[in-house]
Image (tube, grey):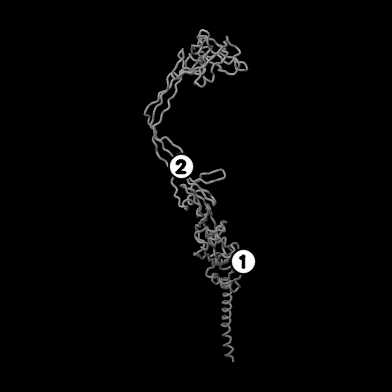
Amino acid sequence: MRHVRKQQKSLMPKILLIVVLVAALSISSVVTVMANTADITVYDGSETYRFSMIGQNPQDILSRAQTEGMAPVSDIDTYDFSPENGTLTVQRFVRVSVKEDNASQMILAPKGKTLSDVFAENEITLGARDTADADLTAALTADIAVQITRAKRVFVSADGKRRMEDLNEGTVEDALKAADITLGENDTVTPAMDTALTNGMRIRVQRYLDLTVTADGKTTEKSVAAENYSDAVEAMGITLGENDRILVATAEGEKQVKAEDNVSSGDVIRVVRIHTEEITENEAVAYSTVYEDTEELYEGETETKTEGVEGEAKVTYTVTYADGEEENRVVKTKEVLKEAKSAVVLRGTKEKQNVFTDASGAPSSFEYSLTGSCTAYYAPAGAVTSIGATPQVGYVAVDPNRIPYGSLLYITAVDGSWTYGYCYAMDTGGAAMCGDIVADLYYDTLEDCTAFGRRDMIVYVVRAGW
């Protein structure tokens, strides 16, 4: 018994030592665990998760956050971990599939962005009439497929005008409706009405018009497909020459139009054939007149000193004919064969005295007058008066002893039935010299002389002599 007690006493220190060691190890473990525990904050969009855990491994953090209720992170999502402050931010992405025409592309876009933002960042632009089958302003929350329909720009030619239309879809018929073009019964369109629209398509409408065309003496009435006058006349089987004219009847008369001008149904058209040719002719060349001043004649009086002589020239014209009728001619070349000689005409500079007349035109003042019979005479070409002047109306023959040469006279009938008017004493009359008459009046023709005959006249001598 004594031995047992002694043995128990020897074991107690050992047990105490073990207990102390175990306690020390436990305390050390607790301290170590507490030292490795971190406060973690996870941001996932509008959701926030906070917890403490041992270590800062991002994958462990994500796993722990999922146990806290966070959705699993997909293969397209990303995250960013900051060990300094223990925050992990998750960025969620969605797949945006964009299709247009025969092309498509896949875009990864952050959740919460709009399609409008995604398109802008990826340089996808929509025209004014392009469409997309999704709301461009809604925030993205899940994968989405978007179909873009591009407007197709087509060009429509009709009635001489070219229109541009943008349509998202449809056929040629839809394009004509958009352009407000209606087809007549006989009108045609290319391509066909049921042809699907493509970008850049060109659509042409051919109108059938009722026209009347006259050319080469023949008039044709016909319904033809034409946009302009050139098309119209060619559809009638008429070939336009380079210089031919096209005339169209209007309320104001015929009006010339251009071949490319728009034609209208009901137009009455006339084609005028134009051709030119060269013609050479010998022509007279008019002479010029040279004036020489002389004091032997009164102002306003002229006298031919030298007769002019016409020249001759060979002239080549470019002549234009309209439907066979000469329209105009233009000188192309001119060769002088014979020079013209100028006429020389004397022009009086001697000043006349003022003559005052009464209401009847007779002079109110004069030196003297003679009353008696007067006759008339004329002279052949080339004749000259007794003082060398050329006979002309206004020159009279007198007795120079009674009426000096150069005297200014006024002669009128006693009864007022005839007036010779103002004239000059420029010739000698045989009958006047015999005293049978007072004066012989010059006229250009025998008929004028016969009409005058013999009359009782008053001869007013306004100014005697030169």
Q: Is residue 431 left or right of residue 362?
A: left
Q: Is residue 7 visible?
A: yes
* Residue 90 image position (x, y, % from top left): 57, 67
Instruction: Please count the marks in the image.
Output: 2
Q: Is residue 438 left or right of residue 336?
A: right
Q: Which residue is mark 1?
A: 46
Foreground residue among 34 and 310: 310
Residue 117 marker:
none
Foreground residue among 390 and 418: 418
Residue furthest out toward the top: 401
- Three-letter amino acid code of the residue under disc 1: Ser
Residue furthest out toward the bottom: 1
User: Against 259, is 148 above or below?
Assistant: below
- Three-letter amino acid code of the residue under disc 2: Ala
Secondary structure at badge 2 equals strand
* Residue 88 image position (x, y, % from top left): 57, 67
Q: Quadrant of residue 417?
A: top right
Q: Is residue 166 left or right of residue 389?
A: right
**First in residue order: circle 2 vs circle 1:** 1
Foreground residue among 429 and 152: 429
What is the CA distance from the residue labelled 2 to the residue labelled 1?
91 Å
User: Against 79, is 421 above or below?
Assistant: above
In front of the other: label 2 or label 1? 2
Q: Which residue is mark 2?
A: 322
Secondary structure at badge 1 equals loop
The N terminus - image quarter: bottom right
Q: Is residue 54 visible?
A: no
User: Against 88, is 20 above or below?
Assistant: below
* Residue 62 image position (x, y, % from top left): 56, 71
Residue at 51 percent across and 22 percent down: it is: 447
